[in-house]
Amino acid sequence: MKKKIFSNGIVFESDTEYTADRKRYDIYPSDDYEEINVWWTILNSGNIPLRAAFVLRNLKNVTIDLNGAEIVMHGRIMPFALFDCENITFRNFSIDYDRPFYTQGTVMEYSDNSVTIKIPELFAYRIENHDFIALSDYWEHRLITGDMLLRCMDPKTGRPSANSGVILALIGDRIYPRPNPPLTIHHLYADDLGDRMVRLRNLPDGFVPVKGEILAMTHEDRRKTAFLIERCTDTVFEHVRLIHIGAMGITANLCHNISLDDFSMYIDEKCPDRIISINADSFHCFHCTGLMKVENCRFENMLDDAINIHGNYLVCRKKVDDRTLMVQNRCAGIKNMEFMLSGDDITIYRQNTQEIKWNGITESSEYIDDDQNMLITFREPIKSDIDEGDILENRRMPDIDISGCMVKCMGGFRISSGKKVSIRDCSFENSSFSILFSGDMDYWYENGPVKDVTIQGCEFIKCGIPVQTACGFRPTEKAPYYHENITFTDNLIEDPEREIMDLRNVRNIVCKSNRIIGKTDCALPLRLIGCDGVTIEK
């Protein structure tokens, strides 16, 4: 393997190892960087093209080992994008941004649906009339368009506050909310009080910041992920730290085999005056196969899930001919995404149920009209009537092996895979769920049901709900269950805030040899609705 020095503007080559010749790389905006199509959000702050500093295409056997160097991004740039690559390894470096893509302030006072915060010097801003404008040396963002997430954080633990939830909002005299948001977007007003003190007015009832907490406000769309990976095989991350990222840590689609070892994000003395590491999920995978292996990672100070692994449902519109279907992508925030490859195994369900109508293998797929509708051609004739509103699921799913991870953020692991799932020896301190098995046929359209899950030897410390399901489907007499075969054994639950398991429409549950200490000492509180085949042993 050849050896070369890593540098800005480098053109990567196959069969090459890249090493660092310095401790810090500062990456500045440039029109020479390749523009990247990002399908996981239709939002675009300021209608600005997104460019990636380092792009790898159609390469094999590349290692980027930077010997502990720090990459500091300046401006609205994506660090890495990979397309159709094989055997790529990232090792021994960190990524940060000069000005984080959020603004935080210490809560000084709250009264009458208004909060006063003091903003540190790191977070440049200005107030015009009642508009809040976040600033850096390379961009400014007037917080009146799209949406913005507000969350109060405990400065001592770094966990989301237990006193208030999370809201979406915009700040200004006139606001322009995005269409179809997941939550109500509230209209706030900013007043400049001087000495970096700002009052935010018109907070909704129930969102009550407490003096001394830190209010974090994200104000950037989710396009600037650290690593975008599409149609890649055997991608490895070892000892990579994300100090701040404005969106996801890793966003992967249609990939095979991804391995993370000490892929971490957290706040420490290297980043004083900060409370957020990354604005969204750490590891978010769509339609991947093979093995997703995650070990020895540290997920802290994040504003969303540590891990989210799933596929996406499509909605049938009509049968075009005996081998072709017209389907629609209704996934919130996703446009012109590549949902499948030739040879993928497809299941079609009757409407929003788990009643199977037909299974087939894809030949091809292509977008038509407005990049939301697709034509899917199958290798064999469709031997069933297909009705508008039937649900199509791509059975591309990975095995998942997660071990030795520390999780201290809002959401933990959101898992949707029908292959083997093992979660072992992890520590959770989450304000929301720790492990969630979901399924959604009405907003995110994330599939699918789990079929073989073991959760063993984990610790759940003051968590909301350690294990739960969210099955957005309609149970029927023919198909009453969504998830199956969940085993929860030899775990420690300390001071649970609610039930240790909240499961619905699950078949075959084993809960045994778990230890609960704290306010529910010796109890085993479970909430099971519509479940069958349940084994419970203390």
Image: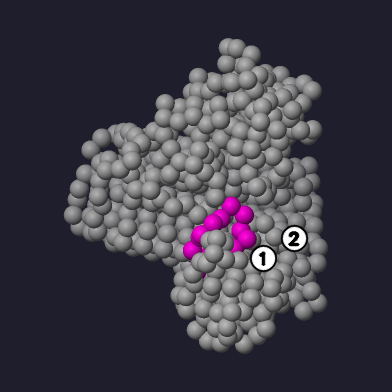
Give the residue at x 72% y 24%.
201
Q: Is residue 277 visible?
A: no
Q: Residue 494, located in which quarter of the rendered image? A: top right
Q: Is residue 284 above or below residue 184?
A: below
Alpha-carbon span between mark 1 and mark 2:
10 Å
Give the residue at x 76% y 68%.
474
Query: Disc 1 vs disc 2: Cβ atoms closer than 8 Å?
Result: yes
Nearest-to-viewer mark from 1 and 2: 2
How many other residues sit within 10 Å of disc 1, few (<14), some (14-19) or many (≥20)? many
Q: Is residue 18 visible?
A: yes
How many other residues sit within 10 Å of disc 2, few (<14), some (14-19) or many (≥20)? many
Instruction: Look at the image and give the residue range highlighted in magenta.
Output: 329-340
**336 in the magenta segment:** yes
Identify which residue, 385 or 20, lies in the foreground. Answer: 385
Q: Residue 310, located in which quarter of the rendered image? A: bottom right
How many numbered discs? 2
**216 in the magenta segment:** no
Q: Percent from the top left, x then y, of residue 7?
A: 25, 41
Residue 203 in the figure: left or right of residue 250: right
Give the residue at x 27% y 40%.
8
From the image, which quarter does the C terminus lie in? bottom right
**Dominant SS in magenta:** loop
Q: Percent from the top left, x then y, of residue 485?
A: 67, 69
Disc 2 marks which amino acid? Leu
Q: Is residue 85 above or below residue 144?
A: below
Residue that mark 2 sits on: 503
Disc 1 marks which amino acid? Ile
Mark 1 and mark 2 lie on one chain; the one further toward the N terminus is 1
Residue that mark 1 sits on: 486
